[in-house]
Amino acid sequence: MVTFFVCLITLVASYFIYGAFLDRVVGIDAKADVPSKTHYDGVDYIPLPRWRIFLIQLLNIAGTGPIFGAILGACYGPVAFLWITLGGIFMGAMHDYIAGVISLRNGGKSLPETIGKYLGEGMRKFALVVIPILMVLVGGVFIVTPSKILTSITDIPYLTWVGIIIVYYFIATVMPVDKIIGKLYPLFGAALIFMAVAMFGVILFDGGNIPEFTTVSNMHFNAEGLPIIPTLCISIACGAISGFHATQSPLMARCMTNEKQSRPIFFGAMISESVIALIWAAVAMAFFGGVDGLNGWMVENSSDAGLAVSEISITKLGIVGSILALLGVVAAPITSGDTAFRSARLIVADMLKYDQKPILNRLIVSIPLFAIGIGIAFIDFDIIWRYFAWSNQALSVITLWMITSWLMRRGSKWSFIALIPALFMTYICSSFIFVSNQFVGMGASSAAYVYGAAVTAVIAGAMMSLIKRGIRHGGEI
């Protein structure tokens, strides 16, 4: 249990140490104007209290990733603790924090717009195609997962839950942010936080034997087919680093009332998510009697992380506690799903320069997006999730290169804090293409890793060329 507590303390301490350092790197200015003041529209640009924005951001980014992904990642053994902690601090929290600040200082613009500003028009056009598709994909995925969970714990049919969630998503997407999201999220946030606190209590008082980190050996039941590098870093995205998060930050940048709120809202929400992932990874290893026991259970149950959550919750928390815990698990994907559609609406509106104050304009943008999302919800879930996981991390790569460009344009001597994660995640996504059966399928061979390194070198060279060109041409930071 020592490893778990060292990682937990490190995550909490990073908010005060690394978070304060990043405040200085980006030059937080408490007197600067913010989008909720300069662009107020009563729909998306609305000032909200910091505590509400924090809860909304946490729920936006959480999804099922820090729960399901952490359980799947726990199959690799205690090395998962290392990835959650170091990835969560130096990649995920930095990524979320600086991407949020960039949006905040650019009028709350959506991610494709800031990518275009700092990486060029070509990257903007690419992002305008890819990111809305990813958002609708997320929305479709997060129609399926909560519907399945709710069906398993009620007598209500699956398709009924699908219909209910779609109706809720549509209303939440087109209504002003303070009407549905601003009022319901505190309740959902309470359920999510209760779930994490309850599971932490299980660790403290009935945690069993949580394995210690003593080796980087791959303990996964399919170690040969799923190597730690790159697969663990794809499996645990939310909780370590996730490109999806940067698409959600502009939603909250439009509601903030002071730049000083950046650390608690962007950095703090990501660290909170890492803590949730750490707790679930530890509980999964301990509950099934160690990593070997967890792997055995996964083999017998088709790696069904949702079933694992149900079994752990009912066994450890009883009926009432398990219902509350499962509500937290349900709330997380629902709240990520509705804001994914909202983000897609705002991205399309930004691209078309289409005023979103009139509700008719919001409906015109939203209806086609939902038509696509509903279709995705009826595609085989395993196929959707498999490719979503990689594309999500690929988006984090683009965002990290954007952050690197922004820091270099500012003349910051600390640009390497983004450059190193950008190179690492570029290699993770590139090598995954050659290693995974989802793509080329070469397995964990030397050739696959060499090809991954070659692709990384090419991408890094192209990105640095774009960045240097932008610096030479100057322009607004």
Image (tube, grey):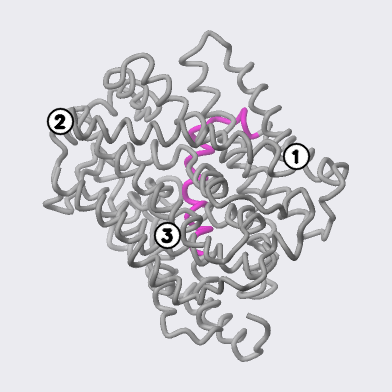
Q: Is residue 399 found left or right of 370 in the rendered image?
A: left
Marker count (numbered): 3
Residue holding disc 1: 175
Say which of marks 2 and 1 sits in front: 1
Q: Main secondary structure of the magenta part?
A: helix
Secondary structure of residue under mark 2: loop
Q: Which residue is mark 2?
A: 208
Query: Residue 266 placed where, x, y %?
Result: 50, 57
The N terminus lies in quadrant: top left
Distance between the alpha carbons at the discs numbered 3 and 2: 30 Å
Per the rendering, the mark at residue 93 is 3
Secondary element at tag 1: loop
Magenta region: which residues? Answer: 376-397
Q: Mark 2 packing: few (<14 Cα in 10 Å), some, or many (20+)?
A: some
Q: Hey, what amino acid is under mark 1?
A: Met
Q: Residue at x 77, y 41 (%)?
A: 366
